[in-house]
Structures are given as C-alpha cells and as structure tokens.
Image (cartoon, helix red, strand yellow):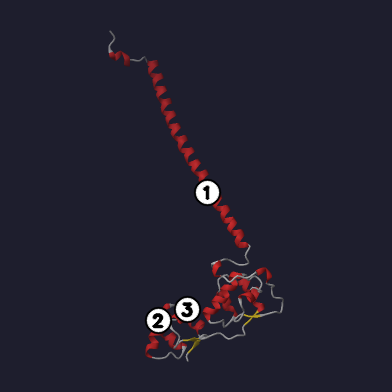
Amino acid sequence: MSNWKDFFYFQKSDRVAILLLSILICVGIILSFVLFQINEPASSYIAGNEQIQKQFAEFEGEMKDISAETDTAGFDSDNIPKSNKNTKSKLSEGQVIDLNSASVDKLLQLPGIGQTLAVRIVEYRMQLGGFVNLEQLQEVKGITVSRFSNILPYLILKEKHKPIKINKDSEESLLSHPYLDRRHVEVILIVRKSRNINSVEELDATGQFTARDIARLQPYISFD
C-alpha cells in the first residue's frame, strides 16, 4: 500500500512544470489587477472629460449672452429700468449731455454705454450727490480707460453737485456717501458732539483721513 507521502513526491521535471505553472498563475493575477487599475481611471477620466466639456459648453453659451450686451452684467435685471436700447440713437459728433442731470435714456445715447452701465452711472451719481469732475466717472464699475476716452467728448458738467452737510447730515446719510466709511463717520460724529467742524484741516487732524480722502472729500463738504 502506498504511503500518503508518495502523493507529494514529484520528479524534477514535474517540480519544474508546477513551478512554471505557479509563476504563470501569479503573473496572470498581477496582470489582471494592473489592467483593472488602468481601465478604471480611464473610465473616470472619460467621465470627467465629458463633464468638463459640458461645463465649457455652458460657459461658452453664457459668454455669448454677455457679449450680446454692450456692457458687463452686475445688476439684477428685475431692478434695472427697462428700456428698448435698439430705439436709442447714439449722439453725433458735437452733441453733449450733462453728466449730473442725464437720465438713463440719455446716457444710453453715449457710445459703448448700455443699460447696465447707464443705471450704474445714475446710481453712483446719486450716492455722490453729483460729480464734481468728469474723471470721477471712471470710479463706476465697467467704465474702463478706453470707454471713458470714447464718451468724454460727449460729456459736460453743468448742474452743480449736492454737498455733504458735515455738521447736520444724519449718520445714515453720511454712511451712504462713497467717500466716507464707518470709521470716518464715527470720527465725525464724535467731534460733532462737542463742536462743529469748520475745515478739512480739522478732519485731517483726527488722523483717520488719508491725504486722498481729504482731496476727494473737500469739494463735497459744506460746513454750514
């Protein structure tokens, strides 16, 4: 009767064959794993690429919508006064409008000015109390150097701006001015509790106003 150990006895050629078979199996398993890892990221890459292409197509569509407008967006369309821009003829050479009194419709007659920019100009003018020089128009978002150069020949300043009554205006009114921030207003209110402010030098002496602040504010401040 054969010993059970005989079942595990192999000749040299058998052992070589078994070793080669084992190596082939291991190599097959490794290759399967590697191919799986390669194919999986590839599918993720394809899916990701398709998503990128979709987002780019959406972005391209949005850009086409924006380019159809004369100027950039920035206001809720529900809050912008409606106007048929196609009916607004542009100003001819030699024609001018007063920047401090022009309506949105009038501003639409300026070259390169569309609905959004016209509204921005009017709103900023209201916050300022009117422009004191034409260069201030460049403080309006969307008024680039080139755009400003194009419309400058059509602009004049005739109507006078409204001054800030620094000793009388309310805190809310002062805070609404683009050239005054909360720190400025708090200083003004503190000084007003003890006395009236009579000059820009007094504001400068508080140390809370820069030279640029003083230069911008000076034309607007009334000490009455």
In the depicted structure, whether residue 31 falls above or below residue 85: above
Is residue 129 left or right of 195 when viewed as pictured? right
The residue tagged 2 is 186
Q: Residue 74 is drawn in which quadrant?
A: bottom right
| Sequence-first tag of 1 and 3 | 1
Q: Residue at x 49, y 38 (%)?
A: 39
The residue tagged 1 is 51
On the image, the x and y values in percent for residue 101 come to 60, 81
Give the number of the disc on residue 176: 3
Is label 2 in a helix, a strand or a loop?
A: helix
Is residue 208 left or right of 74 when viewed as pictured? left
On the image, the x and y values in percent for residue 141 come to 55, 71
- Contact between marks 2 and 3 (CB within 8 A): the answer is no
Give the number of the disc on residue 165: none
C-alpha distance separating marks 1 and 3? 45 Å
| Sequence-first tag of 2 and 1 | 1
Is residue 91 left or right of 201 when viewed as pictured? right
Is label 1 in a helix, a strand or a loop?
A: helix
Seen as rendered, the residue at the extreme top is 1
Report the amino acid beneath label 2.
Answer: Glu
Q: Residue 104 is drawn in which quadrant?
A: bottom right
Is label 3 in a helix, a strand or a loop?
A: loop
**In front of the other: 12 or 102:** 102
- Contact between marks 1 and 3 (CB within 8 A): the answer is no
Q: Is residue 206 visible?
A: no
Q: Nearer the viewer, mark 2 or mark 3?
A: 3
Crowd rating for badge 1 (residues with CA inside 10 Å; few <14, some 14–19, many 20+): few
Please tell me how many numbered marks the rendered image carries: 3
Report the amino acid beneath label 1.
Answer: Gln
On the image, the x and y values in percent for residue 58 come to 56, 54
Seen as rendered, the residue at the extreme right is 93
Report the amino acid beneath label 3.
Answer: Ser
